[in-house]
Image (cartoon, grey):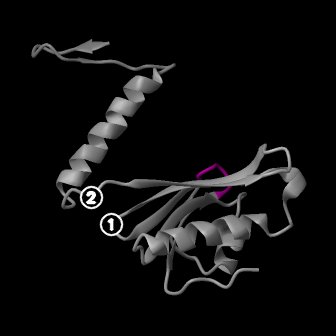
């Protein structure tokens, strides 16, 4: 802990309390809303479930100021290759457009799915080599213009 003369302390929490993390995140959301005409991110979750109702894939993200941001996309190994990742993305994009979004943004690693996202119309606008070592981190975007045809 690093104490300061003004009575404040900087601490590192190796095993943080989720409530403290949520306080930091909410503080940033409130700050951003104050600079975006009161707009705050609206969460978005699309899930893929098996017949028993177990989540076997999903997409987590949010929409804010005309943008869809995909935070995470995952499909279990035993259901990959069946178009489920595409279906999750298209559902999220359709909902984002219903919410008034015209753009989408995501990040992916070289060993994850950059080619998958390119097939869906995303383009790379930033590449960070060496993240992870020997690979790269990509920032990608897409203009959401029309509702997609459903398979």
Q: Is residue 90 above or below residue 145?
A: above
Q: Is residue 28 left or right of residue 136?
A: left
> What is the crowding at mark 2: few (fewer than 14 residues within 10 Å), some, or many (at least 20)?
some
Q: Is residue 134 magenta?
A: yes
Name the residue beneath numbered marker 2: 39
| Circle 1: element type | loop
Magenta residues, start to end: 130-135
Does the magenta stretch mainly form a helix, a strand or a loop?
Answer: loop
Name the residue beneath numbered marker 1: 65
Q: Who is closer to the viewer here, 80 or 39?
A: 39
Q: Is residue 36 magenta?
A: no
Label number found at residue 5: none
* Place of residue 92 in the rendered image (x, y in percent of width and height, measured from the top left): 58, 66
Q: Is residue 105 left or right of residue 79?
A: left
> What is the crowding at mark 1: few (fewer than 14 residues within 10 Å), some, or many (at least 20)?
some
Q: CA gap, disc 2 to disc 1?
A: 7 Å
Q: Who is closer to the viewer here, 92 or 142?
A: 92
Taking the view exactly as shown, the residue that stands out farthest to the right is 78
Would residue 137 be seen by someone viewing this image from the given angle? no
Q: Quadrant of the N terminus?
A: top left
Q: Is residue 78 above or below residue 116?
A: above
Q: Quadrant of residue 113?
A: bottom right
Asked if labels 1 and 2 touch by Cβ distance under 8 angstroms, the answer is: yes
Q: Quadrant of the C terminus?
A: bottom right
| Circle 2: element type | loop
N-term mark: 2 or 1 = 2
The structure residue drawn at horizontal position 17% and vertical position 52%, both measured from the top left corner, is 34
């Amino acid at each position: 802990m690093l104490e300061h003369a003004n009575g404040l302390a900087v601490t590192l929490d190796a095993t943080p309390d989720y409530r403290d993390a949520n306080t930091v995140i909410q503080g940033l959301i409130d700050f951003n809303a104050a600079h975006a005409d009161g707009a705050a991110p609206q969460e978005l979750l699309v899930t893929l479930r098996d017949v028993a109702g177990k989540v076997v894939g999903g997409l987590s993200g949010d929409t804010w100021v005309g943008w869809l941001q995909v935070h995470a996309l995952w499909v279990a190994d035993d259901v990959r290759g069946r178009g489920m990742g595409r279906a999750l993305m298209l559902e999220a994009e359709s909902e984002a457009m219903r919410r008034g979004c015209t753009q989408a943004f995501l990040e992916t690693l070289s060993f994850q799915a950059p080619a998958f996202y390119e097939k869906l119309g995303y383009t790379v606008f930033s590449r960070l080599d060496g993240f992870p070592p020997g690979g790269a981190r990509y920032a990608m975007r897409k203009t959401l213009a029309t509702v997609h045809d459903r398979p």
